Amino acid sequence: MNVLVINGSPKGENSNTLKLTNAVIEGIKENKDAHVEMLTIKDMDIKPCLGCMSCWGKTAGKCVINDVMQEVYNKIMQADVVIESFPLFFFGMPGPMKTFTDRCLPLMETYKGEVGTIGDNAFHEPRFNMEGKKLIVISTCGYGRTEEIYDSLIKEYNFISGKGKYEAILCPQGEMFAIEPLKPQIEAYLRRYKKIGEYIGRGEDIPKDLIAKAAEPILPQRAFETLVNNYWNYCEN
Ligand SMILES: Cc1cc2nc3c(=O)[nH]c(=O)nc-3n(C[C@H](O)[C@H](O)[C@H](O)COP(=O)(O)O)c2cc1C
């Protein structure tokens, strides 16, 4: 099994999201045949999409920009599972991750001009055969809950991939994963993510109750509020 991880946090190795994703990878690696490769977007020179639409016309299926993405397209095609890992920035994905996403246009079929109700379906079919390939989104946010906060990002993924065609593992209170004294709670929490990885590694669907559990806040709301307020007061003073 080939797993391609797209690490889209601009923070690097201290990324809260990456802590969760690394726990998932640990679980995946329980399958000794699993091969996991991680690409860290912030370290890659990915040029922004020019909007020339050549990948839908003259060079159908191919991007005219000759950069590292040419290699990434091949890696995506060879992957059985693609994991996109990034924090929520202003209710969407961070800029570098959006640049990566825009550059995935050559993988999509053309827009054929239909006007109608889209609902939660994808606007475009994939251009190439993606049969059996799984897309998993892992994200942390700073707020105390994921409900509503992630609505715009989820809508974006629904329009790109279609509801039910990908799995989103969303986690609130992301900054709590950087707090050293919370280590025991964090370790217990990460075990849920490792379990999710074990399902992925076995090629099985992730049980819905496990995804719901992964979205539970690590701290009770009151404790979270106190900690956050004390932290910012301390920083300001
Ligand atoms: C520019 C910026 C925008 C953010 N926007 C949001 C937001 O809209 N909602 C939210 O809950 N958290 C937001 N956050 C908090 C991050 O999502 C949160 O701290 C996350 O855990 C960081 O993950 P990382 O360490 O993997 O980069 C924002 C942080 C930054 C730096």
Image (tube, rainbow, N blue to C red):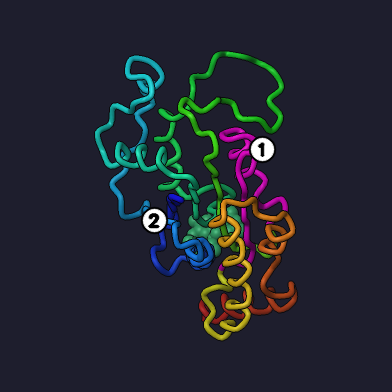
Of callouts 1 and 2, which one flags the residue occurring earlier in the amino acid sequence?
Answer: 2
Disc 1 residue crowd, few under 14, some 14–19, many 20+, Cα 10 Å = some
Q: Point out the residue furthest to the left here.
A: 66
- Image coordinates of residue 195 in percent, x first then y, are 61, 65
Residue hosting label 2:
38
State the residue at coordinates (69%, 68%).
Answer: 217
In the picture, measured across the screen, residue 18 lies left or right of residue 146, that is left
- The residue stretch that appears in magenta: 146-174
Say which element carries label 2. Answer: strand
Identify whether 215 is placed above or below 68.
Answer: below
State the residue at coordinates (41%, 28%).
Answer: 106
In the picture, measured across the screen, residue 31 lies left or right of residue 59, that is right
Tag 1: amino acid: Lys
- Image coordinates of residue 140 in percent, x first then y, are 57, 60
Q: How many marks?
A: 2
User: Residue 78 is drawn in which quadrant?
Assistant: top left
**Quadrant location, ligand no. 1:** bottom right
State the residue at coordinates (37%, 19%).
Answer: 60
Asked if the residue at tag 2 contacts the one at tag 1, i.e. Cβ–Cβ closer than 8 Å, the answer is no
Identify whether 96 is placed above or below 106.
Answer: below
- Image coordinates of residue 120 in percent, x first then y, are 69, 33
- State the residue in front, 174 or 123: 123
**Does the stretch in magenta take in 153?**
yes
Instruction: Mark 2 and ligand 1: say if the CB distance to the nearest ligand atom is below 8 Å.
Output: no
Residue hosting label 1:
163
- Image coordinates of residue 162 in percent, x first then y, are 63, 34
**One can see residue 10 in this view:** yes
Instruction: Mark 1 and ligand 1: say if the CB distance to the nearest ligand atom is below 8 Å.
Output: no
**Does the stretch in magenta take in 91?**
no
Tag 2: amino acid: Met
Identify whether 25 is placed above or below 107.
Answer: below
In space, the residues marked 1 and 2 are separated at their CA atoms by 25 Å
